Image (spheres, coloured by chain):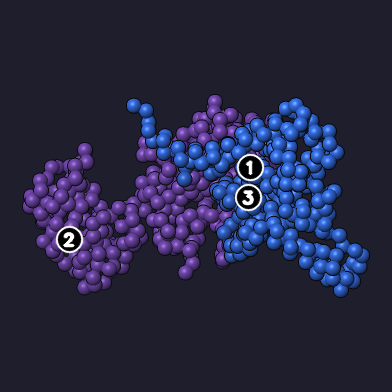
């Protein structure tokens, strides 16, 4: 089986594209193919009018940020960042000026002479970013650059990477398995699974209109109901059992379907579903309440009202938020 | 109360003392008790005798080139084989063999292969490539070849372990920044390997400097390959002058120490530290 198949994406100048998918979906493989670190067995990669898939990585001129940073441990921060310029034969004076500028952009001025081992994880990541962008590549590749950072730093660096991206205006391909990261950073998201593209769209499209049930699951539609299609009118669908939803694909009356909805789109109080509270996880502003329906289906509800274990409750939702896919 | 776990190191410390420190101290003291003359007479004799002091130069002339050849040859080969592969496994297995064989067997093999009527001479004559006499044994070259055969696998395996310990992602990162194959070696691998190469050089040198069996068996122990260990052996077991032999051994140790200190001192000038590029 191919690690990567049917991936066709056009990336515009200045665009921030996220490759999103669970581990093993081929997103890092795709990135390494673009960088030239892995050879394509078939297909092609083009940069403007030039076909580049046969070029070795050093001839492609893309900037890449690696998951474990891959900083050269024996070189100072200045030398790390200047490495790409040195390889391009750029004069020392010119290189110095550009390195200083890049370090200012990632806010590392004053750390020029340190070795990578003397920096914190967040600082190392900034060096890696500076090293990738200082050569002014037409395309910046980032392979899960934030996965080694702690939660707070991750949020900070997210904003930082967006800011750097905006001020440089370079196309960026960003690989991640974190939906939130992709949604918050990207102009466009490519959702991948098992080496294939499942959906390409803007963050709001991916978030509210997942192309299929698997994408929906991956994007946080944790609740699923099995039902039979009763009536279809345009995008509205009436399921046997009285639930109203939104058809995400052509549905045949009488066919089996699966309806998906997010915990935050469900509410406790009034609604067509009834069940018993089996678990409550307190989460500060709201709680995650597990409601088990009479047929045994477990619903996760993000509820702002309080619920107690064992309560009989009703669960409601807005019909356009219940996405119905063919089973 | 003081930490008593330190006592756990006592047996090892005692063993070291018994096996190394005591003989060393004994030899050192013995070297200052010559059979005749004052306490420095052995050293005076060594440096004034034409039979003794040139052995330092002779040994260095064998050990330094052999070490340089071994390390210099092992580095490119180990570097080429840095990714796990069938050939890496195969070659490592083949190269372990000379290490286990020992120098005497190697010398015996060399006499068969490289001797005046050896297989190499016969082959060259058979192919009409070279008909003249081949003198690769019982001289300087014989010992040098023997030192390379026995020392190369050691240097190769040591360097291979250093090379494979360097995170290959670093070279990939360098490649994306525009570094071709040579630049990746020159700027990434080589500087990170230097401390290991220095260590390998020291170990290989010490091994080569104490050459004895091959200097006798495939060398010319009366002249060109009369190495320092032969001088020590003669003093001890032909002249029965243990005191002089001790002095020769001390001088031998001092030369080794001087070269090792020089190389390890130079090692302080280069980067030594982790060879990965960030958090794992």
Rendered position, B12 above or below B269: below
B198 or B137, which lies in front? Answer: B137
Q: Residue at x 36, y 46 (%)?
A: A180
Dot 2: chain letter: A
Which quadrant would residue A233 be assigned to in this image? Answer: bottom left
In the picture, one chain is blue; tell me its letter: B
Q: Residue at x 12, y 51 (%)?
A: A277
Give the x, y percent position of residue B205: 70, 45
Q: Which residue is mark 3?
A: B159
Dot 1: chain letter: B
Q: From the viewer's perspective, is A247 left or right of B228? A: left
B112 or A32, which lies in front? Answer: B112
Q: Residue at x 83, y 33 (%)?
A: B48
Q: Residue at x 42, y 34 (%)?
A: B6
**Is residue A179 visible in this depiction of the protein?**
yes
Q: CA distance from mark 2 to mark 3?
A: 61 Å
Tell me which label, 3 or 1, sits earlier in the chain: 3
Q: From the viewer's perspective, is B89 left or right of B110? A: left
Q: Which residue is mark 2?
A: A297
């Amino acid at each position: 089986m191919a690690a990567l198949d049917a991936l066709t994406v056009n990336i515009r100048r200045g665009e921030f594209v996220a490759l999103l998918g669970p581990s093993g979906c081929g997103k890092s493989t795709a990135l390494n193919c673009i960088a030239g670190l892995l050879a394509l067995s078939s297909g092609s990669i083009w940069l403007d009018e030039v076909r580049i898939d046969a070029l070795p990585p050093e001839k492609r001129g893309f900037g890449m940020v690696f998951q474990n940073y891959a900083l050269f441990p024996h070189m100072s921060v200045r030398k790390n960042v200047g490495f790409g310029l040195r390889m391009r034969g750029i004069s020392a004076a010119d290189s110095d000026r550009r390195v200083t500028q890049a370090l200012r952009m990632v806010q590392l001025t004053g750390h020029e002479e340190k070795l990578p081992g003397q920096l914190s994880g967040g600082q190392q990541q900034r060096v890696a970013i500076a090293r990738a962008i200082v050569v002014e590549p037409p395309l910046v590749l980032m392979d899960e650059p934030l996965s080694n950072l702690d939660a707070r730093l991750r949020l900070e660096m997210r904003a930082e990477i967006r800011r750097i991206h905006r001020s440089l205006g370079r196309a960026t391909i960003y690989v991640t398995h974190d939906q939130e990261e992709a949604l918050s950073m990207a102009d466009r998201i490519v959702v991948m699974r098992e080496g294939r593209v499942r959906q390409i769209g803007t963050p709001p499209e991916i978030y509210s209109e997942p192309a299929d049930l698997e994408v929906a699951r991956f994007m946080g539609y944790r609740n699923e109901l099995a039902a039979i299609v009763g009536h279809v009118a345009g995008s509205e669908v009436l399921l046997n059992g009285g639930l109203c939803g939104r058809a995400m694909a052509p549905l045949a009356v009488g066919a089996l379907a699966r309806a998906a909805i997010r915990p935050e789109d469900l509410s406790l109080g009034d609604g067509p579903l009834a069940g018993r509270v089996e678990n409550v996880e307190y989460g500060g502003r709201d709680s995650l309440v597990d409601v088990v329906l009479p047929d045994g289906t477990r619903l996760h509800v993000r509820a702002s009202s309080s619920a107690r274990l064992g309560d009989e409750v009703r669960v409601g939702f807005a019909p356009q938020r219940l996405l119905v896919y063919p089973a | 109360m003081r930490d008593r776990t330190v006592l756990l190191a006592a047996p090892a410390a005692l063993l070291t003392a018994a096996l190394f420190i005591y003989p060393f101290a004994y030899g050192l003291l013995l070297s200052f008790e010559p059979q005749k003359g004052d306490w420095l007479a052995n050293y005076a004799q060594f440096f004034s005798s034409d039979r003794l002091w040139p052995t330092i130069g002779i040994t260095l002339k064998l050990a330094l080139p052999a070490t340089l050849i071994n390390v210099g040859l092992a580095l490119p080969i180990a570097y080429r084989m840095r990714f796990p592969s069938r050939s890496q496994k195969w070659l490592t297995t083949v190269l372990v063999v000379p290490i286990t064989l020992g120098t005497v067997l190697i010398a015996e093999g060399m006499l068969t292969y490289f001797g005046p009527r050896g297989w190499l001479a016969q082959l060259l004559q058979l192919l009409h490539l070279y008909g003249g006499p081949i003198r690769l044994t019982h001289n300087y070259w014989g010992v040098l070849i023997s030192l390379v055969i026995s020392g190369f696998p050691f240097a190769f395996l040591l360097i291979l372990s250093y090379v494979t310990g360097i995170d290959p992602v670093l070279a990939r990162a360098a490649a994306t920044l525009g570094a071709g194959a040579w630049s990746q070696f020159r700027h990434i691998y080589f500087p990170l390997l230097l401390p290991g190469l220095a260590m390998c050089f020291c170990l290989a040198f010490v091994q080569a400097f104490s050459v004895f069996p091959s200097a006798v068996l495939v060398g010319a122990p009366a002249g060109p390959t009369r190495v320092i260990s032969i001088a020590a052996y003669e003093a001890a077991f032909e002249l029965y002058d243990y005191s002089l032999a001790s002095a020769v051994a001390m001088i031998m140790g001092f030369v080794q120490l001087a070269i090792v200190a020089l190389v390890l001192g130079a090692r302080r000038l280069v980067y030594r530290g982790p060879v990965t590029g960030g958090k794992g």
